[in-house]
Amino acid sequence: MEMNLQPLALTCFVTGQPFVEGARVASFLVRSAQSTEVTRYDVLESALGSYQAPGYVACSWVQAYKPRKNQGNPDRAMKLTAESLFVTLADPMTDPTPDNTRLLQFLALMLERKKILRPKGLNHDGTKNVYEHAKSKQLFEVAVGELSPQFFLQVQAQLSVLVGPGPAPAGAAAPVTEAAPVEMPAS
């Protein structure tokens, strides 16, 4: 999963105030109702009451604002991958929500399969799976969850907001259209 997305804004979408170091900023990944484009909206936590998402919210998180360092390749920073979304949502400074937790659990499974994350067992109280990021050796904790059909349906709905609806499931009935009669030539 890869898409282009804007980096963290420098100002609040609602108030226009510049973010200062340490300010609590809520970030939303939103797909417009009119198109399949995903846009990131960053809002000061104090202005959340005035924010209304202009489409379907795939996920959101709150974090302390840190000014960007100069990066050598800004195009690379703008690319949102499953790995970078996981790292953002798994950051201990990010406040967990049920939607984010579900998406985080799914991303952990996917990245474990790709060998980007290595499972390290459960935390001391058994409520979270511990994963090690293969490149950085950083440890992440992800809430243990039940992988039920309902879980996957909810994740599918979240992912469809991010990447658009997928192909119809196998075995799904194709839409019925009325066909014109076909005449066979006489033999």
Image (cartoon, grey):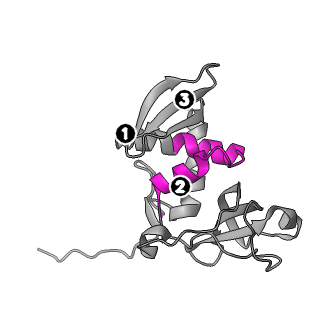
Q: Residue at x 37, y 39 (%)?
A: 113
What span is in magenta? Answer: 80-106
Circles 2 and 1: CB atoms closer than 8 Å = no
Label 2, residues with CA under 10 Å away: few <14, some 14-19, many ≥20? few
Q: Position of residue 29 (x, y in %)?
A: 63, 64
Q: Secondary structure at mark 3?
A: strand
Name the residue carrying label 1: 113
* Picture disc at residue 26: none
Kind of residue sitting beneath label 1: Arg
Circles 1 and 3: CB atoms closer than 8 Å = no
* Picture disc at residue 85: 2
Question: Distance between the Cα atoms at labels 1 and 3?
Answer: 15 Å
Residue at far top of view: 125
* Picture disc at residue 129: 3
Kind of residue sitting beneath label 3: Asn
Residue 80 appears in the picture as rendered:
yes
Image side of residue 75 versus residue 60, left or right: left
Dot 2 or dot 3: first in sequence order is 2
Label 3, residues with CA under 10 Å away: few <14, some 14-19, many ≥20? some
Image side of residue 13 versus residue 72, left or right: right
Q: Secondary structure at mark 2?
A: helix
Q: Secondary structure at mark 1?
A: helix
Q: Residue at x 68, y 70 (%)?
A: 41
Identify which residue, 22 or 162, lies in the foreground: 22
Kind of residue sitting beneath label 2: Leu
Res 66 quadrant in image:
bottom right
Q: Position of residue 63 (x, y in %)?
A: 70, 55
Image side of residue 70 versus residue 29, left or right: left
Q: Position of residue 46 (x, y in %)?
A: 87, 63
